[in-house]
Image: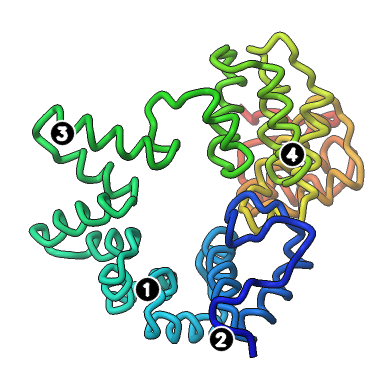
Amino acid sequence: MQAEDSTPPATDEDSFHREPFAAYVDWNRVVPAYEAACFGGSGDACLALAEFSQTYREGEFSQPLFDRLSVMCDEGNAVACRYHGLHPDQYIMASLRRGCELGDAMSCGGVAAFAEPAESEALYRQACDLGDPSACKAISETEPDPKAKSALEQKACDLETAFCFNPDPDRLLRECAETGWACQRIGFGLSLGLQDVDVQRALDVLEDACRRQPSMCEILGEVYASHRVPFQDLELAAKHHRRSCQSEEAYRMRHLDNGCVRWVELTCRDKGVCTEETLEAIMKMDPLHRVPFEAMYYCKTGDGRAQDALARCDCGLVCENGELYSQE
């Protein structure tokens, strides 16, 4: 059996545990290897699986992994205590308190969120001192002294770019390889026509993120679709949204609907290019988006199912000559 601190199995990509959000790996290939390593004795592999579950599966741990984290917590692994404590159905406060005692910042923050006011402030300050940017931000919001408030806000920013009011552009470009938030911030700025970054460098960085992690392609799709940029290209926008829509990874990252919706809008709705592939994309959407887009697709393609879809949609539209119109 492997030792507790043994390294997870090598892959062609970076270790998920060393670089949590930016591994850009094929999870269908890598997760089974990490599961085998975790249940074979690798603590790092178990933590990697826990991080993956919280990021892509909304904290849904398998029972064997949950039990393994409990054992690791009892043995003194602070991060395991945090993941065990942050159960999606009910926080396990004993594990979070154990993690906090062992020096895990986020465990302290988890306890603080449910503690009485007097204890909560002390725990948030402890979490901030240990390096939890959200705890620093939480304290800053109630800090009466302007200088102390500013110092806490700056500390939160120093710890994580997402907490910066006006993050450094170069820092964002560097961190796009590590966190989806930085890529989204870059894309948002470009879409608005804000020239606070080197545009070509930013596009190159986003192209690389899209190549590595297809669900991120929707960011580029929005950039190229924006009328505020001089390089607007609706064909490229549709291409990137299509790639995001078709990415299996998009299911795990909950990005699926946006990529599919925008691709269908740019092709079927705006250009009348409605194919079987379009219908497949529509069927992937959640019901809120799927039903009206079904109606649009059937209407544009002259399919008799348009009326049934419109009835289910109950959106006040009628189909006439291949187009949807308001009943008013």
Q: Secondary structure at mark 4?
A: helix
For mark 3, does the 10 Å Cα neighbourhood hold few (<14), some (14 to 19), or many (20 or more) residues? few
The circle on residue 64 is 2
Nearer-the-camera pick, 57 or 143: 143
- Residue depicted at 59% across the width and 70% down the height: 49
The residue labelled by disc 4 is: 210
For this view, does 96 lie left or right of residue 142?
right
Label 1 close to label 4 by CB (< 8 Å): no
Q: Left or right? Give the position of 173 relative to 240.
A: left
| Amino acid at dot 4 | Cys
Which mark, residue 148?
Answer: 3
Which one is earlier in the sequence, the residue at label 2 or at label 1?
2
Residue found at x 37% / y 73% = 85
Residue 221 image-quadrant placement: top right
- Res 85 label: 1
Q: In this picture, is 199 found above or below 101?
A: above
Q: Nearer the viewer, mark 3 or mark 1?
A: 3
Which image quarter: residue 117?
bottom left
Q: In 3D space, how far apart are the residues under numbered discs 4 and 3 (Cα atoms)?
A: 40 Å
| Neighbours of disc 1 within 10 Å: few (<14), some (14-19), many (20+) | many
Please state the horizontal and vertical placement of residue 172, each as a whole percent of the image.
54, 30
For this orientation, the residue located farthest to the top is 230
